[in-house]
Amino acid sequence: MKRLLLLLLGMQSYLAIALPPEALDRRLNEVTLLMTHNSASLRTDAPPLSGLSRAVGTSAVTNLASILNKALPLMPAGENKDKLAQILASNPVADQNRSLEEQLADGVRAFKIPIHVYNNVLYSCHTMSAGDVQNLMCKVQETLREFMPFPDLRESLYAPIAHLQQHRCLLDETNRPLINVFRTVNDWLDKNPNEVFVFYLNVMIPDKFAVQYTNEIKKILKQSGLWDKLLIYTPGTPWPTIREMIDSGKRVLMYTDINAWESIGLLHKNKFSGGSDYDFKVFSKLEGDTKTPKIDWGNVTGNHLTIVDSYVTPALAGNEAEARKANQYNVVMQRLKAYEAKAGHPVNIFMADFYELPSKNDLIKAIADYNMAHIAATAVK
């Protein structure tokens, strides 16, 4: 009874999302971690399209942006207009405000990192798909033909967008070599030996090409120091407890959405988890999904992890106004409980944009309380 009382008191005061000591003997599939969506793609104060400006020249990009800004009000409503409007904002593909180091200090314990190849190097960058860039290029061409009747000048303005098609990572002002992300987390783990961490590598490279980078991903994992910390999980077997992960030194679970890297232990997420897709362009769609939760990929039977997307993407990336709604304490708790009921066990990874909004006493506290409630329920038994 005394232990239960202490746990319940802890639910009122525990404001960090890092797992409490009472979670040490719980298995990985019995705890809940906050994952930030596109963790390294951050809001900045830089002018719009700064990365592209550095690549092709400031004047060309400035002139193009000026014309497109004038043209936007006259364009018909639709997805292309929304995407173009977002591109003309500062870091249009950002889903977070706070640096990786700040996220770790706040208690975030899982990162989703989109991966592209940029200049033959594996990069962390959130950007548009090749198809989306092609569609946007067509729309820009139409706009320039309408507003710029001189072909030579029109082509010079079109050049920055053509360059973007070949170097899509330039759209993300905070793109960086993947090894830099790995080193940031490894350094933090070295300073915090009693912590565990999860990576979701969203590999934006087709399997037939990604397999060529198997040795490269292994090399940068070794160079960063993460290789020796990787938990190599065998699907269907019991998950280790948090204490076992810490004691063994295998404190990092890393998974992907491709099959190409399974030969080095980076499993496709479908092999051991299931969850929801994020296709919510407005908050009301996310609310509707909470009322009727569904497993869109993988499965959540047995000891499979349950992974829940919980963010709104109106166009290219997250929206802070929508995040303020999606991250409210009661909204998060309802979503956690709805997917727990659907899966038959607790949600394990909860993915969000701009997690600190509307305040750290919302999303962060909701997940901390959710963890403590399950610990308290186990203590009663």
Image: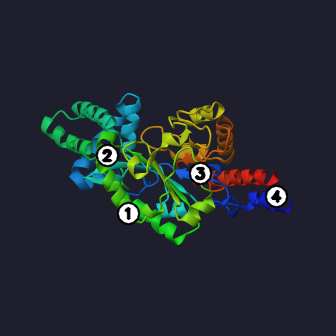
- Amino acid beneath label 2: Val
Residue drawn at (71%, 53%) of the image: 369
Q: Amino acid at mark 4?
A: Leu
According to the picture, the residue beneath numbered tag 1 turns out to be 222
For disc 3, the neighbor class at 10 Å (few under 14, some 14 to 19, many from 20) is some
Q: Which residue is mark 3?
A: 239
The answer to whether one can see residue 195 in this image is no
Q: Label 2 to label 1, Cα distance in Å?
A: 18 Å
Image position of 353 with respect to 187: above or below: above
Measure the alpha-carbon separation of dots 3 and 4.
Answer: 25 Å
- Horizontal and vertical percent for residue 205? 33, 43
Using the image, tell me which numbered label, if any, was put on residue 4: 4
Farthest right residue? 1
Which type of secondary structure does the marked residue at label 1 adopt? helix
User: What is the C-alpha distance between the residues marked 1 and 4?
Assistant: 43 Å
Q: Mark 3 and 2 residues: CB-CB less than 8 Å, in contact?
A: no
Disc 2: which residue: 211
> Label 1 near label 3: C-beta < 8 Å?
no
Crowding at mark 2 (Cα within 10 Å: few <14, some 14-19, many 20+): some
Which quarter of the picture shows residue 159? top left
| Side (left or right) of 341 relative to 189 | right
Using the image, determine if residue 284 lies above or below residue 63.
above
**Residue 288 in sight here:** yes
